[in-house]
């Protein structure tokens, strides 16, 4: 138990540093571009490379590779399997990147059918240059998967901070001399992903054997390929929601896609720190338990992850609802980002937050199914959730605009979480402990209400930085006091 929470803490620390730099990147982008046509174009151009990054890289490779590599490592064949996998990636990834770059002129008009011609041409130009990001990030994800399996969580979690830092530098320093200005975002992310892989490479020494010929692939690679297919489907279902959101938002006012992106970044901050860290630490443990200790070890790891996710995610949800507007104003409302952009971004954020804990649970449940060798189940639940999201998008975008799109995404997260949880409960019991969850929910609700009242009636006329600093400090102190009074403070201590 202590080792698991220690792994979570190390992963969370690295991920938190990465997410903080990501927030810094968004602050720099908001200052230079605001919620503008240029940033809309970049986001659409980056959509497909980013989706494929999740499919082949950060999501797919980890989910398909870690269980197989864990088993091979236990059998003394870890370097062999790692070498086979790397050899195959070095063959496949350049072909995928080339095909994607050539196809940008055809798929981008489908993604942003509502863009005017000039904005669409910019998106196509940016999309052509963004595909190398896919190959570089996939190699970085492969390295991170090996390091996680060997108990190295901090460096893989913090490595994604490097593209954020290079994008900040590019946006602030190169925008005045690059034409079109949005091209600096492409240059920044390309440079950063190169460094992201290189910084992890020295830690792989001794983990990879001599590279074999990549074709035909060995049996281990073919097994991972078969496991990867349903994982790809699951990630694709999740990204289908974003595709529909962006297409519908392309018909709304200029900057609507940017507004959704800024709100999504704040929404993903607790998901990235909590959900990704818990899932990264839990997947190797779940994979080992699925082989040797299904009766006790597997339910215990899952129960631990769910409890920690509630104790850490629910107060973040309450805090963002209470302080979302001053937080957005503090972070983004300068340069090209206006007060009206703050209002629109907070509206979208409040819609996303409905599904915050649901998406956190989806991260954990899906990794549990991968470890059980049932990766197809998250695909099915993701398809149902995607269908619900699309239906709600079409229903709510007319009357509510970007808020309706965000709310549909939040509700879809709970559809997915409930379906996966129900399927897991049918397979095994003993992983759900309601006491800490209920107490964390009560403490979070009380804390959120108190912070909202403080902000509205005491700090309403204060500068944004004062509202955020006082509100966050007061909320954190109150939540810890409530945790002690309600008897779940040990979960907070374990997560440190």
Image: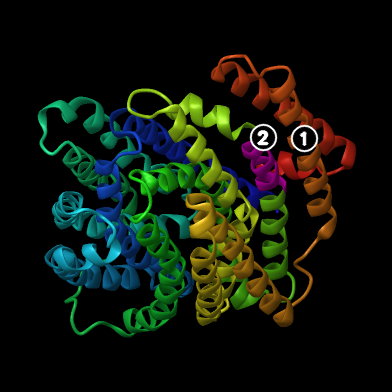
Q: Nearer the viewer, residue 495 or 433?
A: 433
Find out whether residue 59 is within the magenta segment: no
Q: Which mark sits nearer the N-terminus, 1 or 2?
A: 2
3D distance between C-alphas at marks 1 and 2: 7 Å
Label the magenta part by its dominant secondary structure: helix
> The residue tagged with tag 1: helix, strand or loop?
helix
Instruction: Judge left or right: residue 285 versus residue 308.
Output: left
Q: Which residues are magenta?
A: 311-321
Name the residue tied to disc 2.
Answer: 322
Instruction: Judge left or right: residue 149 versus residue 270.
Output: left
Instruction: Judge left or right: residue 468 versus residue 397.
Output: right
Quadrant of residue 132 within the rendered picture: bottom left
Q: Which mark is residue 449?
A: 1
Q: Nearer the viewer, residue 256 or 174?
A: 256
The residue lying at 46 percent from left, 50 percent from top is 152
The residue lying at 74 percent from left, 20 percent from top is 457
């Amino acid at each position: 138990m202590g080792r698991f929470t220690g792994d979570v803490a190390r992963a969370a620390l690295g991920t938190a540093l990465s997410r903080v730099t990501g927030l810094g990147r968004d602050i720099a982008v908001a200052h230079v571009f605001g919620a503008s046509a240029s940033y809309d174009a970049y986001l659409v151009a980056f959509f497909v490379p980013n989706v494929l990054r999740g499919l082949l890289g950060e999501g797919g490779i980890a989910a398909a590779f870690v269980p197989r590599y864990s088993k091979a490592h236990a059998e003394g064949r870890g370097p062999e399997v790692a070498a086979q996998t790397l050899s195959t990636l070095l063959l496949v990834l350049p072909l995928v990147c080339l095909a994607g770059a050539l196809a940008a002129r055809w798929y981008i008009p489908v993604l942003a059918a509502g863009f005017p011609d000039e904005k669409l041409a910019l998106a196509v130009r940016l999309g052509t240059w963004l595909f190398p990001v896919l190959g570089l990030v996939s190699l970085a994800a492969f390295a991170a998967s090996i390091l996680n399996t060997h108990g190295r969580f901090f460096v893989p979690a913090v490595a994604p901070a490097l593209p954020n830092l290079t994008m900040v530098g590019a946006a602030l320093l190169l925008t005045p001399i690059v034409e079109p200005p949005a091209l600096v975002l492409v240059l920044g992310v390309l440079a950063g992903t190169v460094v992201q892989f290189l910084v992890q490479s020295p830690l792989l020494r001794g983990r990879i054997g001599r590279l074999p010929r990549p074709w035909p692939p060995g049996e281990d690679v073919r097994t991972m390929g078969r496991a990867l297919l349903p994982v790809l489907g699951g990630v694709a279902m999740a990204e289908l929601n974003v595709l529909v959101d962006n297409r519908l938002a392309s018909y709304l006012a200029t900057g609507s896609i940017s507004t959704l992106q800024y709100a999504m970044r704040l929404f993903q901050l607790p998901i990235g720190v909590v959900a990704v860290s818990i899932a990264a630490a839990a997947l190797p443990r779940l994979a080992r338990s699925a082989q040797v200790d299904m009766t006790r070890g597997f339910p215990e790891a899952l129960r631990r992850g769910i409890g920690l996710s509630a104790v850490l995610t629910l107060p973040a949800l309450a805090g963002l609802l209470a302080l979302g507007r001053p937080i957005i104003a503090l972070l983004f409302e300068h340069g090209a980002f206006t007060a009206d952009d703050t209002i629109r971004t907070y509206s979208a954020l409040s819609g996303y937050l409905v599904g915050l804990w649901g998406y956190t649970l989806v991260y954990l449940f899906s990794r549990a199914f991968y470890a059980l060798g049932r990766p197809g189940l998250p695909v099915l639940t993701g398809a149902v959730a995607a269908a619900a999201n699309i239906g709600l998008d079409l229903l709510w975008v007319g009357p509510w605009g970007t808020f309706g799109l965000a709310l549909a995404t939040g509700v879809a997260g709970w559809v997915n979480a409930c379906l996966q949880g129900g399927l897991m409960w049918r397979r095994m019991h003993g992983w759900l402990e309601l006491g800490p969850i209920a107490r964390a929910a009560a403490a979070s609700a009380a804390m959120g209400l108190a912070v909202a009242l403080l902000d509205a009636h005491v700090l309403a006329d204060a500068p944004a930085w004062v509202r955020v600093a006082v509100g966050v400090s007061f909320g954190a102190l109150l939540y810890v006091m409530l945790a002690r009074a309600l008897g779940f403070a040990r979960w907070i201590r374990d997560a440190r």
